[in-house]
Amino acid sequence: MLKRLLCTLAIFAVSIASGSARAGNFALIVGINQYEYAGDLPNLRYARPDAETIAGLLKNASSFPPGCIRLIVDSQATRDAILRAFADLERACYDKGGPADHALVFFAGHAVDAGASKGDFVKGNGAQSREFLAPYDANPEDVYALADGSYENSTFIKKEEFSAQLSHLSEQNISLIIDACHSDIPDLGQVMRLQLLGTDKRVGLLAASNEDAEAYEFPELHHGALSYAIIRTLFALREETPRDQLVDETMDKLYQSVMTLFSVTKVRGKRLIDYNRPALEMYPSGTRGIRFAALTGIGALPAAPTIAVASRERPSNVAPPPQPEREAAPPAPLSPSTTVFEPPPAVAVASVSPPAPLPPPTGAVEFASAIPSDAYLEVNGSRVSWTPGRRILLPAGSYILVVGQPDFTYRSVHRVDVPPGGTVPIEPAFVGSLAIRSVEKAHPTQLGPPLRIVLDGQSLGTGNNMQWSNIAAGTHQLSVTVHDTTKVTQVTIEPDSPLLVRYLAQAVAPPARTSNVIPL
């Protein structure tokens, strides 16, 4: 039924106040890999890891106040919880922003294609659908007809609702990043303009593709394409910025960096830009310089006490203008009271080599459970060579560690602060649980008919309310059969988020039998 209705989505919304002390300072991070109605909403691979990576980066490197970064994933990310979080964070973090206040919202999950067919709740008379974001509890089957012949689904987050949440924020400048199929939607811009009419807010939109194109996520990148480019840009920006110094990234510069990475990064023999082309839109038209985020650097401090920071647009090969040579002033004449001291004779001194620099202090990260032999490790966004074991040594500092397996899409993300000489324990897990329940569509509280379950080609049994544990984390092919009808979908198992899949069963009367006797 959904056809091209649903696509992977990732949204940043960053709003920056222009010096107003009233504005809040918070980050709302939402990532949904697995859905309550996974039979109709296919589970995703990298929505949750993208959200966790962004949340870890913000906790590790941004100026957000403690307690003002909220991560909501999978079953926590219901429709009510997402909409309620805007007001909760605005209230809790009120007046905590200081002179550079901003709010950031990241959403990774499913979205609705604006040009969906009538059965997919498009508005009447050829208008675009109002439904926009799919929370964890979105039910595509819960569609009802209105008096004007159009259709609605109240389990999704509508464009008007999302735009209203942004317009109610106290900040004046809002930046949106949408990593989704058909994400440069003219209809969304029109809704935003109506919601922000009469305000002095400015909006910047960085979309993964235009309304007629799809966006992609790749196992080779372990991210959605646009999220990958954004994360790589932010890590690189931190590395080129002196340690503990703040650096601003604007939407304009971020877009330039994203386009560069899309032009040079190849997956399966094609550049990312050959799959889809990001687009930057500003409202009102011509707006520039909207700040994306402020991050702390991790690069080495220069030796000189005075630090000159050049803009990134300035060519590095342009030499400074030559300075004119100045003649030395003649020595002043000696007065009768001046005593001249002759330098002492030179004394031969044995050369002494400077002491070797001390190695940086190190600490350790210890894994509380065994790591699979084929696991890979990423440190601050870069894949490193390692031998999987129980312990790794790192220079003291702050890190975002990612442990994953090549054959599975699950990635265990950890933010760690490694102290000198200390050990930080982390516990990546690689198994999770799966529960499947059959429900009567007419009576959702009642169990439905038994289902025959097959996971990755292996039969798990038959029943209407079953659960399994110790299933490898990652994406699997789930096949469910009731009577003579089979439905196949992709499900993602997360170790710390048990997956419950519900199937709505509806009895359908068999077609009337016709006689094959030829009348005389």
Image (spheres, rainbow, N blue to C red):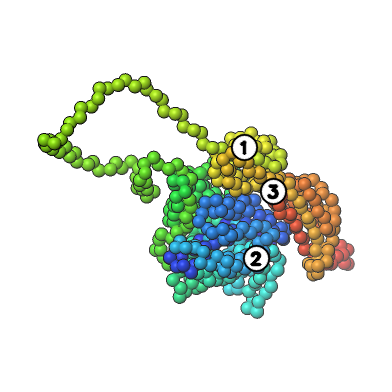
Q: Which mark is residue 457?
A: none
Residue 119: x and y, percent?
Answer: 66, 67
Classed neighbour count for the residue bearing mark 3: other residues with Cα under 10 Å, few (<14), some (14–19), many (≥20): many
Q: Is residue 102 shown left or right of residue 495?
A: left
Disc 2 on helix, strand or loop?
Answer: helix
Q: Nearer the viewer, mark 2 or mark 3?
A: 2
Picture residue at 56% right of the left edge, 37% below the top: 362
Amino acid type shown at disc 3: Thr
Disc 3 on helix, strand or loop?
Answer: strand
Q: Earlier in the sequence, mark 2 or mark 1?
A: 2
Alpha-carbon distance for marks 1 and 3? 28 Å
Alpha-carbon distance for marks 2 and 1? 38 Å
Q: Earlier in the sequence, mark 1 or mark 3?
A: 1
Q: According to the image, label 3 marks what residue? A: 475
Front-most of 159 and 150?
159
Residue 122: x and y, percent?
Answer: 61, 69
Q: Which mark is residue 81?
A: 2
Disc 1 on helix, strand or loop?
Answer: strand
Picture residue at 47% right of the left edge, 63% below the top: 98
Q: According to the image, label 1 marks what residue? A: 392
Residue 36 seen: yes
